[in-house]
Amino acid sequence: MLLRCGLRGQPEILGAGMNPELEQQLQGELERARKGDRGALARLISVLERGGYGAACVERGLSARAADSYTVGITGAPGAGKSTLVNALLGEMVADAQRVALLAVDPSSPLSRGALLGDRVRMHSHAASPAVFIRSMASRGQLGGLAVATRSARRLLEACGWPLIMIETVGVGQVELDVASTTDTVVVVLNPGWGDEVQANKAGLMEVADIFVINKADKAGLEATRRDLEGALASLPQQRRPAIVETVATEGRGAVDLWAAICAHRQAIEESGELRERRLGQLRAELRGFVEAHLEVALDELFATDCADLQLAAIGRGAVDMPAAGDVLLAELWSLVNSPKRR
């Protein structure tokens, strides 16, 4: 049985109702996207976002990760100027890589799950370029800074031959660590005045950054922030210490230095073999996420059964303790996962 995440991030189990016509149509779209049809590429990403059988069809058509594709993640707290920085960086990337794709994740309303996908507006200078593909994706309430279909969209872009992919996270603070298991180089954007919080954040973004950017470097507090950041990183071996780059994204200052730091980091992890290890870790995280989504569906089914109700009632009247009831439900969950209808 196939499993994919639905539009609102809820997994769907698929098996019956195979649709050969839809599958053929989507394979045709994939072929057109591989030949450079940007409209087909955009439509396929929409299919991945909707989830369900269509998304599963697209996933089956994707080959293994292209060896020459490279992914850069841009993350940081809200208001750090990530989108403006990405806009400045795109020009430098295009000059070297020639073709760049951007997946920009925007926050969603907690009520409607809708989002103002504003990155196309902020990056208007690149939106019409044939060398740049920009796609905004709604987070739809997902933690971790990424949208549900971000990883699938990245794989699609790789399969379509985009050599450089940038992922800008939603900007939700310390929890946006999913970007570390999705991208090859992680850029964390800070602002002057952030230095007082360095110690409190060492267990979060501090540990996933490959490059730190102090954006809005023309503001007061730059030196203190850099000093505190360097102090927090001093315990790391020199060869593993993230670079620190200063930028003023609104003026384009520092974009050249940032692109040089990204290229240097890529070269270092390619030569050391770390890139290969990182990508194995990315595959592990994606596969784990697939399995967790499958189990989540089975859990929802389990807690809709009489078995769960009986155990809850027994706990409520003191006839059974929580661990014992949990063991019963785990055994039932295993039966659900292995039932013939899921094969």
Image (cartoon, helix red, strand yellow):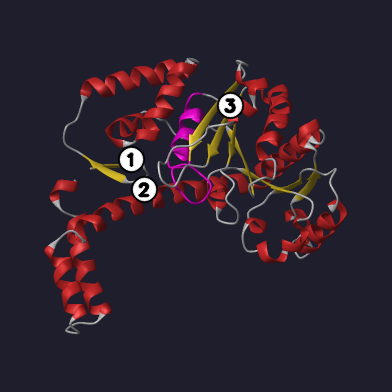
Q: Is residue 141 magenta?
A: yes
Kindly state the secondary structure of the residue where label 3 is placed. Answer: helix
Q: Label 3 crowding class (10 Å Cα cut-off): few <14, some 14-19, many 20+? A: some
Q: CA distance from mark 3 to mark 2?
A: 30 Å
Q: Which residues are magenta?
A: 139-160
Q: Which residue is mark 3?
A: 120
Q: Is residue 265 visible?
A: yes
Foreground disc of the pair 1, 2? 1
User: Which percent across, then down, holds residue 196?
Assistant: 76, 63
Amino acid beneath label 1: Gly
Amino acid beneath label 3: Arg
Q: Label 1 crowding class (10 Å Cα cut-off): few <14, some 14-19, many 20+? A: some
Q: For the view shown, which residue lies furthest in the front direction?
A: 111
Kindly state the secondary structure of the residue where label 1 is placed. Answer: loop
Q: What mark, if any, has residue 6 been given in the picture?
A: 1
Q: Which residue is mark 2?
A: 290
Query: Does label 1 or label 3 sit earlier along the sequence?
Result: 1
Identity of the residue drawn at 46% across and 43% down: 109
Above or below for 243 versus 264: below
User: Which percent across, then down, holds residue 1?
Assistant: 23, 43
User: Which percent across, then down, holds residue 199?
Assistant: 71, 66
**Quadrant hosting residue 239:** bottom right
Query: Does label 1 or label 2 sit earlier along the sequence?
Result: 1
